[in-house]
Amino acid sequence: MTSLAPVVVVIEDEPQIRRFVCAALEDEGCVVFEASSAKQGLLEAANRKPDLIVLDLGLPDLDGLQVVIQLRTWSSLPILILSARASEQDKIAALDAGADDYLTKPFGVGELLARVRALLRRRVQMSDLPTLVTIGELQVDFINRTVTKAGEPLHLTPIEFRLLCVLYASAGRVITQRQLLKEVWGPGHAESNHYLRIFVGHLRRKIEIDSAQPKHILTETGVGYRFQV
Amino acid sequence: MLCLNGCYNQTIILLKILHNFYTVSHKIPPMLKIHSLGSTKSLFIAVGGCVVMTYISTLLLPHVALANIVMLFLLTVFLIAVFLGSHAGILAAFLSVGLFDYFCVSPRFSMAVDDVQYLITFSVMLVVALITGQLAARLQHQVLLSQQRLNRTQALYELASALSGVLKLNQVSSLVDQFLKDTLQLESVVLLPEQDALVPLSAHHVWFESHMAWAAYQSDSSKILSEPDGIYYFPLKGSTRSRGVLVLALAQGKSALKDDVLELLLTVASLLAITIERLHYVEVAGHTETQMATERLRSSILSSLSHDLRTPLTIMVGMADSLISAKPALSNYQLEVLGSLHQQSFKLSGMVTNLLEMARLQTGEIRLRKEWQPLEEVIGASIQMLVQALHQHTVRVHLPDDLPMLAFDAVLIERVFYNLIENAIKYSPAGSTIVIAAEVGGDSVLVSVSDSGLGIPADQINAIFDMFVRAHSADQAIAGTGIGLAVCRSIVEAHQGRIFAENTPDGGACIKFTLPVGTPPVLSEALLEGESI
């Protein structure tokens, strides 16, 4: 059983935060390795073959963003960012550099574990993409490109469908506006944020019950979107 | 006739010498020239010169042909004209003809002549003397003028290079004042705009009319305005706008400025304008740099403050959560205490966020990250953030379908909604509904967040947006710092909006704020239909 347990490396300089994060992850059944500095963290990440990295952005020896960039040069493993900084720009930079999700301090253990589970699940699912999925009242057929809501067929434009596909494929993590624009419209439109917002608005009106209080396409204000299955 | 021929030849030679002299005179340092002898004095010298020449001629007469004596007189006239100007030249021409006749032509010591041919000699001599004298004098004048021009150009060049190195405005003014006084004997003052008036840059002795200066400052062209009493107004036109006015005053009794001087002054004015403009941009650049440094410092202080305040909160929440899930399970009472510890820590975190936001908004210019976006999205996000606190309330959002996109800073407007909804939860009974609505009215969108709680006492309806003011402050059961609405006001006002409170007809509180509609970007059809893929 232990051989199948997910391996997590926690890189956090504050010992007490590290302690409860590690304890919570161990309770969840993970094998946890701790690191208190970026240097040590990168070493652990290379040696322990982890399934997930939990990384504090404010490390004393190296900026968290640099750690993400270095990790991404050789690995695609999921990275969860912990950030106490006020600025959204730091989070966007880390996400655009390849981090998968972030948590703003302070956060509850429940929240932390939910994010960790979602990221670990993603890692398993990545290998086999489903052709037919059910998301709440929605049924999406990726082969025939049809969507039904509570049995009723929904008419989505090609862009809306593509947007839904990209959002679904990134379920369980945060996707920045820039990443979404690049995936849906191509690299030339990475700055056309207002188009993205219009299409997200249209899609929400079609698939959500109340588009002002969405349950699937959640907004991470100033950062991007999170798709919730 | 031979004599006439000789005269002609000599005239040619003279003209050649004259030409050489012209060339040489350009190289004579100005100090060697007799520049400004008084006119009477120069006439006396001319007479003296002619007398001396006559004396020499009488000595030479027995040994030299008369034609050569004529040449000597012509040379005298020429030299006098060159050095003493045209008046002295004319006098010398007539005088030398008379003296030549009287002393050299027989019968000597009489104005009469034996040979009528001499009349031709006299007239030719007179004509040649007058012409060469005039030419020489004009030449001299030209030399003087070009020397003057050279001096001015030199001075202008020195002024330009001095101005290009100047770093302060008052240095500019003293350089220009000095230049105008030295080269043109003009009093001057530079006027610079300050609010709605023109203010002298330095102490001065120029009596000018403010309305004339203002007219010069306001005029679109670089036309010079002047007054009959010798006051000139030169507008200083920079590349982007008028930078000020240069006022000049002629010294008492001097005649109006000539065209060449005006041209020089226009050059000075444009040099001055360029320098003032350059100094303006130097100042702007310096200011921007300081501002950026301040901004960096401020954001790094707030960032580390945020880090330092949130870290212990994170530890508290984490520890409480660890205990809640500790095995063996704790008693219900202990779990309740830990749950409330968890909850209160988050509340404290919200207050910390508001305080930091307030500090950020109040300690300098707010830099908004404005983007065009629908209001719906940011309302949804703020409700999502409060989903736990909202478990006993319902939120209804009424937005018209044709609500335009607005340009705002999403993070800040989210904070406004967060604070307003949080307030509504705090002050309205469990089970009630909070309504968020928006409508377009003219050039702004009016957004309202209303609850069905106690409402706001009439005497506090304006004060609640001030710092540390809370409605129902006697009611200590409701926690709060009185900072949330102050943050809302700062954010809304930074967006050129207005925030105010009302009570709904059924007694609840309703906070309304406006956001300007602006001009949303035009959307490209190709992108909307996805044809670009």
Image (cartoon, coloured by chain):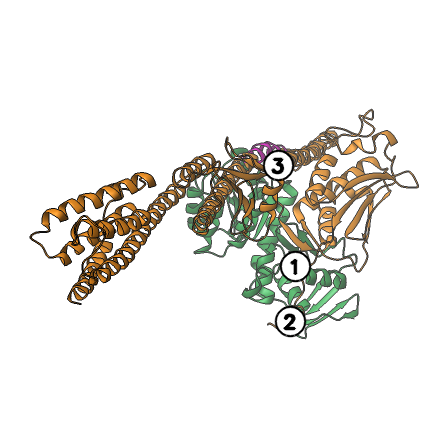
Q: Work out whether residue B215 or residue A136 is closer to the camera in this orientation and state it.
A: B215
How far across and down, in percent of the image, does residue A28 sit? 60, 45
For mark 2, give the secondary structure. helix
The residue most toward the top is B474
Residue labelled with disc 3: B360
Residue B320, by quadrant, is top right
The residue most toward the left is B63
Separation of residues labelled 1 and 2 (CA atoms): 14 Å
In the depicted structure, whether residue B344 falls above or below residue B395: above
How far across and down, in percent of the image, does residue B397 sit? 81, 51
Residue labelled with disc 2: B526
Q: Which quarter of the figure is the C terminus of chain B placed in?
A: bottom right
For mark 1, give the secondary structure. helix
How far across and down, in percent of the image, does residue B452 sit? 88, 40
Which color was chain A given? green
Image marks 1 and 2: residues in contact by CB distance under 8 Å: no
Question: In terms of sequence position, does the residue under pointer 2 or pointer 3 come before the other?
Answer: 3
Q: Amino acid at mark 2?
A: Ala
Q: Residue at x 27, y 42 (%)?
A: B34
Separation of residues labelled 3 and 1 (CA atoms): 27 Å
- Quick one: which chain is orange? B
